[in-house]
Amino acid sequence: MKSIPSGLRARVAAPRQRLVRPLLLAALCASLGACALVPGDKAYGLRDSQSAVRLPTRSADGAEPVPANVAIRPITAELIIEQMTKAAAERPTATDTNISGRGGKGGVNPVTAPDYKVGPGDVLTIIVWDHPELTTPAGQYRSADQAGTVVNEDGTIYYPYVGTLQVAGKTTRQIRELLSVRLAKFIEKVQLDVRMAAFRSKRVYVVGEVAKPGQLEITDIPMTVLEAVNRAGGFGPEADHSRVLLTRKGTTYRVDIQAMYEAGATEQNALLEHGDILNVQDRSFNKIFVLGEVQKPGSLVMTKKRSTLAEALADTGYIAQEKANPKWIYVMRGESDTPELFHLDGSSPDAMLLADRFPLRPRDIVYVDAADVVRWNRVITNVLPTAQTLFQISGTRYPLFGGRNP
């Protein structure tokens, strides 16, 4: 049998190779498109079902985290009405934050303002009428706090004819009555008055986002949370009015001053005591994140915790018209143990009315999905360099084999 000449064999195999190479490249593209080997986000997979990825949540008995499905809820007028009703019910009250102590245990009571009680370091001015030698023994040209009587560390004072007297924990009225009884043995028809010359024994500390952080002295005028912030120069530009932390005796309470301004929640205005620490938080917690196909993706800081979906999209330059698919706009919320996922079909202009009424919360994530053609172009962009490399390798000539492929 005659053998086929080598030149004829090469001419027969060449068309076959030209046919096989495109088929291999097409199979490679199909396999890469079907697998998760192509980089990129897969949020568009949410379109195929009404449940998102399974997220870990805390089990009912508080043991190990267990996975749970997150249902996708469409943003409709009914949903917005439901959220408005829920927000009104979640408005902070005294019982929620345990500030007032009316319905809770061990709360902070803003109702009763007790009389100021003298403590170590305070300076008293004791005036005995018709007896200047007792009133200003150090001279009439000294100030009241310099000429006054300083309460010692043990809570006592020394006064002529009376001697050592325990005054710590007493009000000025009680001290006046006590001195009147003691001086009646030496002075007929005693007439005296006791006043506070300087308040030095009780103080609170105001830190965080205020104009002048530091310590404030508590005087006979009751100091509330709002009064302390005002005396510290007011809120700073980065202050979060709804997150003011009050620490007392190892327990921290959250005070919502914004609720005082907007909802009249005066029960939040707690009365401060000696040693309280008031920490005004910054706005870094009140961020929302806008990702996906928008003009300027990134994070936004909410002003007084008020922002809507339409405002977030507008602040990031709105969706990228040439790349985004407005039918698939998602809001992901994971602030509680049960995450929530919302979907807005923004393909029609009237959908922006819903977006303007949909309130966002701190740490919400807004995601705008890409159009189908954009995803296809991204797959091709990732696959094309690999396909070109394989094609160049398949067409390489090797001199050692006479210019033929081995």
Image (spheres, rainbow, N blue to C red):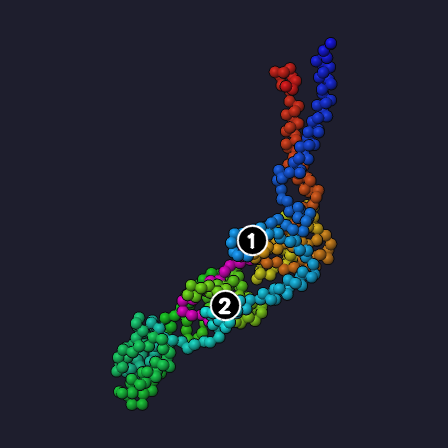
Q: Inspect the image, locate mark 2, and give the three-letter code of the amino acid beneath it.
A: Asn
Q: Which residue is mark 2?
A: 98
Residue 227 seen anywhere in this rendered image of the structure: no
Residue in view at x 50 percent, y 60 percent: 281
Crowding near the residue tagged with mark 1, few <14, some 14–19, many ≥20 C-alpha atoms within 10 Å: some
| The C terminus lies in quadrant | top right
N-term mark: 2 or 1: 1
User: Element under label 2?
Assistant: loop
* In-front residue for pair 105/274: 105
Q: Is 300 included in the stretch rendered in magenta? A: no
Give the image quarter of residue 338: bottom right
Q: How many marks?
A: 2
Q: Is residue 40 left or right of residue 105?
A: right
Residue in view at x 47 percent, y 69 percent: 105
- At which x and y percent is residue 399? 62, 16
Q: Which residue is mark 1?
A: 57
Tell me the CA gap for discs 2 and 1.
Answer: 27 Å
Q: Inspect the image, locate mark 1, and give the three-letter code of the amino acid beneath it.
A: Thr
Crowding near the residue tagged with mark 2, few <14, some 14–19, many ≥20 C-alpha atoms within 10 Å: many
Residue in view at x 50 percent, y 73 percent: 102
| The N terminus lies in quadrant | top right
Instruction: Work out which residue is located at the far front of the displayed protein and give it.
Output: 61
* In-front residue for pair 168/303: 168
Q: Is residue 108 left or right of residue 310?
A: left
Q: Is residue 148 left or right of residue 269?
A: left
Residue range of the region highlighted in magenta in the rendering: 268-287
* In-front residue for pair 181/145: 181
Residue in view at x 70 percent, y 61 percent: 77
Q: Is residue 248 above or below residue 339?
A: below
